[in-house]
Image (tube, grey):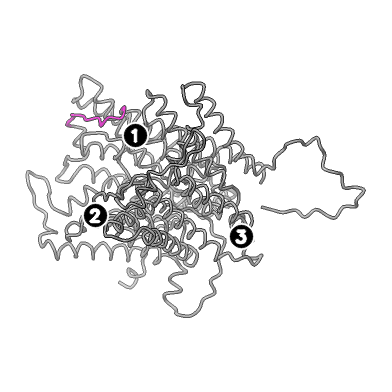
């Protein structure tokens, strides 16, 4: 127990548990999961299902942030991915066949990966600051998505495609299974191989890791491609949830939610050490928060206010300076270190 | 930035400034000049392509429609010059408009509302600055929290749009200032005054020089004994103040307050600053450049409205492409000086 309270995951898990218990006080059957038509139903399952797109993107974002980067374009990439898939399906006579859906989804993810290659190129080869390099695609991306859908909300009617978000396999929603599969693969790749350590090395000191023989440029490039891949799949989930591609609204602010999930999970924005499990809990936390607020009878729109409080609390908990000030009430010299912005 | 102090030369050796240098500008002016050239090139291209584009009123209308963005970009320039970033400005614009609209509806007098809104924005900026400086948390995440906070407060005030019917505000909104055959609005004057004051503060005061010094190297600025803490916090107060002022101008422009307005406006402001030639790493750039950056963004809109066949999404794509071009230019520029 002692080691658990010291663990980095203690605070996020505690927060999540408290939120869930808060729900229980308002809705006594909050934890109940019933089986209907061989599928699992219940509030918890809903939270899992709805958190899937954020979780997927947050997983990719964790690795990007671990390399001391950031990707603001994921929302736009998700919108483009949805737009590509829906426009391709809607534009063909055999719109509702499974084959069409598979081709459409493959194309969408391929386009997303290409956009990731572009972002990675700007950051790793040209050496542009990640925040501004991805801002380019964040701004232009929604325009591109609208260009693809011709400014319309493209609706599709394809049973396989709508299953991505609403379907069930083995009683569980497909969306969360996809997200968990990506989680498992990422965890194995980063923790059972040297990849994770190399990513952390690049995040802690790109120059030193390069001199030590780490291919910093390739690693940085890969993480941007990976986050775009995740965003592409998340875009498909979002589009499939409504059976439509909305270039303006799809994935709006999802980059901020994803970054928030990463930060809540204990990964520092300064790069280096990362925690995929923390991100998983962070994504669940954000979705539970979004569910809790209407449950408590507070208008859902004030969600932002609570997110702001969460961000501030989490940052203060993580900041060594704040810890020092809060823990020991003695005047500490507030020397400013050269902050890497 | 490194300043090399030239060894004292004997009068015989020191050559007079060679006239052959002509009009070579210092390298630091190049990005701004590029922006100005781009602006006039776009204006020229528009004048050739579209009838009626060549009128000076086109530029004045861009000013009228973007006066709030100029104020916003000026505040953002201060923050970016120190190497920080402020994501909260768009939400603060919406919050300011909301506060103004709801306070006016409940019968506050206009001057009181203006003071209250400006104070709110400045205090919000102050709080963010304090957290950023004293707790050493990245500006990105702190201002992200500020963004959520301001947007959340908007919804607390009201979920619906609130119209502004106050006479002072409506008369300010409908007022025009004629210049010959053309016109501007009082908001443009406010924006230009803010621009001039900002330029004076940046280039003629101790605070302004410290802003550049902190952006160049915070560690060096600290070792030089400059007031780093005061400056770093100060720029966020300025940005908060400018956002609140921009919010007032926006409220006057739309004559309403609505929680969902100004979403993503922080990106427009950052884009304007970058296109205006300010380095995102801090230490180099001018407020005038940011204002020209806003005009470039505004001119893209004019292009689209003049053309009629271009769809609105080309605005976003063009802004993205311009951002890319300017970031690449900056990249070349910084690589050369390093």
The CA span between labels 1 and 3 is 43 Å
* Residue at the image point whose x is 33% and y is 47% from the top: B255
**Which residue does the numbered mark 1 point to in the structure image?**
A80
**Which residue does the numbered mark 2 point to in the structure image?**
A290
Residue furthest out toward the left: A37
Residues marked 1 and 2 touching at CB (< 8 Å) = no
* Residue at the image point whose x is 38% and y is 33% from the top: A143
Q: Position of residue B92 (x, y in %)?
A: 38, 54
Asked if one can make out residue B270 in the rendered structure from this viewpoint, the answer is: yes
Is B128 or B32 nearer to us in this picture?
Answer: B32
Dot 1 lies on which element? helix
In the displayed structure image, the side of residue A180 where residue A22 appears, left or right: left
Dot 2 lies on which element? helix
Asked if one can make out residue A187 in the rendered structure from this viewpoint, the answer is: no
Discs 1 and 2 carry the same chain letter = yes
Q: Main secondary structure of the magenta part?
A: loop
**Looking at the image, how many numbered discs can be counted on the residues?**
3
In the image, the segment drawn in magenta is A150-159
**Which residue does the numbered mark 3 point to in the structure image?**
B210
Residues marked 1 and 3 touching at CB (< 8 Å) = no
Q: Work out whether mark 1 precedes mark 2 in sequence or the reverse, and give the earlier one.
A: 1
What crowding class fits label 3: few (fewer than 14 Cα within 10 Å), some (14-19), or many (20 or more)?
many
**Nearer mark to the viewer, of 3 and 2:** 3
């Amino acid at each position: 127990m002692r080691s658990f309270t010291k663990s980095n995951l203690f605070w996020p898990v505690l927060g999540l548990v408290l939120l869930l218990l808060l729900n229980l006080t308002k809705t006594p059957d909050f934890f109940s999961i019933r089986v209907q038509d061989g599928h699992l139903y219940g509030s918890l399952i809903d939270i899992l299902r709805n958190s899937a797109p954020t979780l997927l993107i947050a997983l990719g974002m964790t690795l990007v942030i671990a390399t001391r980067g950031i990707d603001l374009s994921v929302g736009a990439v998700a919108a483009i991915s949805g737009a590509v898939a829906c426009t391709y399906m809607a534009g063909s006579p055999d719109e509702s066949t499974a084959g069409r859906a598979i081709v459409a989804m493959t194309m969408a993810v391929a386009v997303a990966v290409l956009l990731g290659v572009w972002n990675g190129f700007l950051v790793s080869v040209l050496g542009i600051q990640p925040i501004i390099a991805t801002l380019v695609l964040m701004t232009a991306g929604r325009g591109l998505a609208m260009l693809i859908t011709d400014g319309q909300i493209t609706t599709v009617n394809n049973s396989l495609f709508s299953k991505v978000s609403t379907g069930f396999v083995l009683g569980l929603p497909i969306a969360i299974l996809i997200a968990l599969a990506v989680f498992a693969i990422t965890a194995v790749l980063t923790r059972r191989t040297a990849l994770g350590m190399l990513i952390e090395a690049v995040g802690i000191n790109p120059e030193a890791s390069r001199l030590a023989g780490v291919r910093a440029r390739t690693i940085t490039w890969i993480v941007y491609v990976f986050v775009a891949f995740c965003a592409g799949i998340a875009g498909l989930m979002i589009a499939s949830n409504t059976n439509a591609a909305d270039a303006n609204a799809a994935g709006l602010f999802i980059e901020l939610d994803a970054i928030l999930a990463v930060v809540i999970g204990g990964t520092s924005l300064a790069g280096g050490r990362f925690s995929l499990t923390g991100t998983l809990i962070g994504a669940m936390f954000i979705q539970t928060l979004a569910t809790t607020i209407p449950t408590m009878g507070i208008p859902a729109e004030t969600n932002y206010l609570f997110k702001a409080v969460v961000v501030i609390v989490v940052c203060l908990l993580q900041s060594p300076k704040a810890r020092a000030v809060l823990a020991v009430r003695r005047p500490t010299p507030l020397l400013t270190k050269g902050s890497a912005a | 930035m490194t300043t090399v102090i030239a060894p004292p030369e004997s009068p015989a050796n020191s050559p007079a400034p060679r006239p052959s240098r002509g009009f070579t500008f210092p390298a630091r002016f190049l990005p701004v000049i590029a922006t100005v050239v781009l602006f006039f090139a776009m204006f020229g291209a528009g004048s050739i392509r579209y009838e009626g584009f060549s009128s000076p009123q086109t530029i004045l209308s861009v000013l009228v429609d973007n006066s709030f963005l100029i104020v916003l970009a000026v505040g953002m320039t201060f923050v970016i010059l120190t190497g920080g970033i402020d994501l909260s400005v768009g939400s603060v614009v919406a919050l300011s408009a909301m506060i103004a609209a709801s306070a006016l509806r409940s019968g506050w007098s206009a001057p009181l509302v203006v003071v209250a809104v400006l104070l709110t924005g400045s205090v919000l900026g102050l709080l963010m600055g304090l957290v950023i400086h004293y707790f050493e948390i990245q500006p990105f995440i702190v201002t992200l929290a500020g963004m959520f906070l301001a947007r959340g407060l908007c919804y607390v005030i009201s979920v619906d749009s609130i119209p502004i019917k106050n006479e002072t505000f409506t008369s300010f909104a409908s007022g025009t200032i004629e210049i010959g055959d053309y016109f501007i609005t009082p908001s443009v004057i406010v924006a230009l005054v803010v621009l001039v004051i900002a330029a004076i503060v940046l280039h003629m005061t101790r605070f302004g020089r410290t802003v550049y010094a902190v952006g160049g190297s915070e560690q060096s600025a600290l070792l030089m004994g400059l007031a780093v803490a005061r400056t770093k916090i100060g720029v966020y107060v300025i940005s908060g103040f400018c956002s609140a002022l921009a919010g007032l101008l926006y409220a006057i422009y739309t004559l309403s307050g609505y929680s969902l307005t100004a979403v993503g406006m922080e990106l427009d402001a950052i884009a304007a600053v970058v296109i205006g030639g300010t380095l995102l790493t801090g230490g180099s750039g001018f407020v005038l450049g940011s204002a020209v950056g806003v005009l470039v963004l505004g001119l893209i809109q004019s292009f689209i409205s003049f053309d009629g066949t271009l769809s609105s999404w080309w605005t976003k794509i063009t802004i993205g492409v311009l951002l890319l071009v300017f970031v690449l230019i900056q990249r070349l520029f910084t690589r050369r000086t390093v």
